[in-house]
């Protein structure tokens, strides 16, 4: 059996020391890049994002979740809407799985907690 990569020696350095050097270099490069990007953001004007909150939320629902702009492109728009709906279904199911694992009640199984509904049958088919 071969030794673990961290236990071997590379360029005369132990594997763990090389990992530490690579970690420090990568964190330094990331910090430098982020410092430059935040510097550019600080030069710009402020953006009032919490004005017209009701109109912004309505636009999010209509354009973001409702995908109102996609039907302009017949085939690509329809396919995009179907793929987006699939990702929404997967996201909602992931959230419910987290909830099932976090809020487990004794004596209640997953099958009794989430009976098969029409939506679940359709989402499993899609």
Image (cartoon, rainbow, N blue to C red):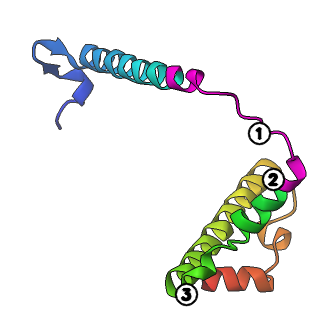
For marks 3 and 2, the one nearer the N-term is 2
Q: Is residue 50 magenta?
A: yes
Question: Do residues under tags 1 and 3 come within 8 Å of each other at their CB atoms?
Answer: no
- Find residue 69 and report its horizontal and vertical position in percent: 65, 73
Q: Is 123 rendered above or below residue 4?
A: below
Which residue: 29% across, 20% down?
Answer: 22
- Find residue 42 and report its horizontal and vertical position in percent: 59, 21
In the rendered image, the quadrant that contains the N terminus is top left
Describe the element under mark 2 as helix, strand or loop. helix
Which segment is the magenta one?
39-55
Give the alpha-carbon distance from disc 2 to disc 1, as whole Å: 9 Å
Could you say which disc has been placed on residue 56 in the image? 2
**Residue occupied by mark 3:** 74
**Label 1: few (<14), some or many (≥20) within 10 Å?**
few
Q: In front here: 93 or 3?
A: 93
Which residue: 73% across, 79% down?
Answer: 120
For marks 1 and 3, the one nearer the N-term is 1
């Amino acid at each position: 059996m071969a030794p673990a990569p961290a236990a071997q020696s590379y360029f005369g350095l132990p594997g763990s020391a090389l990992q530490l050097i690579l970690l420090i270099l990568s964190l330094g490069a990331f910090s430098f890049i982020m410092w430059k990007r935040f510097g550019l953001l600080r030069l710009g004007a402020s953006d009032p994002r919490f004005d017209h909150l009701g109109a912004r939320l309505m636009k999010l629902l209509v354009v973001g979740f409702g995908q109102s702009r996609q039907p302009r492109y017949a085939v690509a728009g329809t396919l995009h809407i179907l793929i987006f709906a699939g990702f929404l279904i997967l996201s909602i199911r992931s959230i419910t799985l987290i909830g099932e694992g976090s809020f487990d009640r004794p004596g209640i199984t997953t099958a009794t907690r989430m009976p098969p509904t029409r939506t679940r049958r359709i989402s499993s088919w899609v």
